[in-house]
Image: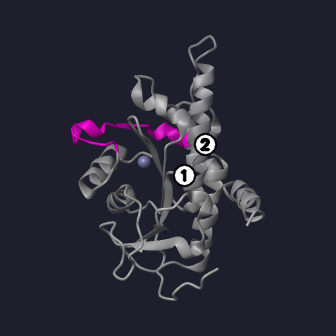
């Protein structure tokens, strides 16, 4: 593996976590050839780190690049960055407590972005969805759009739709989740997909569906934070064994 410039604005641990996270999300089919994860830099304020434009399963440490607060690569890095990097930069700008972000085209989530059915926490693993799952309608901001968040203006609009929530759906496109670190963002991306799948299945049975109450959602979100290390350790081991 190519040795990184020692001035790269991320610790070894953060770099390793981002590489593992990319592979974990690919393995769980939350990301395929598309989608990405980023983390706020732990070395340089105002910067964040994500892979160059590449399928997540292929990401290595050498593929990570640092982006500034406007989501532009730092001077001297001419590699191709993801078009939708503005999703990340504008959420970091509006949500100072957010440390990591996943954007995916998670298949089971798509129906909830294009219908009147709201994605809601159906079990404790999806408890973090209690804060709401607003839908970002790109047409409201750009009529002649191609669905992609391809500039700062659209990134800012998406961050506005997310508000103080943990997850925002994107009509006809996918979703974006935030976390207090890489493990939590990964956890939330995986369980948003699973919650969506279960909610679609429950809809086939006799209803109405009994969702978590807001209070249960809040309590369960806090409880899950305390056990995050367990899945994180397992998921890392599963992908690093295939290096
Ligand atoms: Zn996308």
| Quadrant hosting residue 133 | top left
Residue at (61% x, 75% y) in the render:
13
Q: Position of residue 88 (x, y in %)?
A: 39, 59
For residue 203, say whether it is visible. Answer: yes
The image shows residue 168, relative to residue 39, as above or below, that is: above
Residue at (42% x, 45% y) in the render:
165
| Quadrant hosting residue 242 | bottom right
Q: Is residue 142 magenta?
A: yes
Q: Which residue is mark 1?
A: 33
Magenta span of residues: 127-147
Q: Is residue 92 magenta?
A: no
Q: CA distance from mark 1 to mark 2?
A: 20 Å
Q: Position of residue 114 (x, y in %)?
A: 40, 28
Residue at (71% x, 61% y) in the render:
236
Residue positioned most to the top: 206
Q: Secondary structure at mark 1?
A: loop
């Amino acid at each position: 593996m190519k040795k990184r410039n020692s001035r790269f604005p991320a610790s070894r641990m953060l770099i390793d976590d981002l590489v593992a996270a990319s592979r974990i999300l690919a393995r769980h089919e939350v990301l395929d050839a598309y989608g990405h994860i980023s983390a706020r830099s732990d070395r340089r304020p105002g910067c964040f780190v994500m892979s160059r434009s590449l399928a997540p399963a292929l990401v290595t440490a050498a593929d990570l690049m640092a982006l500034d607060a406007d989501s532009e690569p730092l001077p001297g890095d001419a590699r191709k960055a993801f078009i939708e990097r503005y999703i990340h930069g504008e959420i970091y700008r509006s949500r100072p407590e957010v440390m990591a972000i996943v954007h995916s085209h998670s298949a089971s989530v798509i129906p909830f972005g294009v219908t009147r059915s709201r994605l809601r926490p159906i079990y404790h693993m999806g408890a973090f969805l209690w804060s709401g799952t607003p839908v970002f309608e790109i047409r409201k901001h750009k009529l002649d759009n191609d669905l992609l968040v391809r500039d700062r203006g659209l990134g800012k609009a998406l961050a506005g739709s997310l508000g103080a929530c943990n997850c925002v759906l994107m009509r006809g496109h996918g979703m974006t989740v935030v976390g207090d670190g890489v493990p939590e963002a990964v956890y939330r991306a995986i369980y948003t997909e699973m919650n969506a799948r279960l909610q679609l299945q429950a809809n086939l049975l006799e209803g109405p569906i009994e969702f978590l109450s807001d209070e249960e959602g809040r309590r369960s979100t806090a409880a899950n934070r305390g056990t995050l290390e367990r899945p994180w350790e397992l998921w890392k081991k599963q992908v690093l064994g295939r290096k």
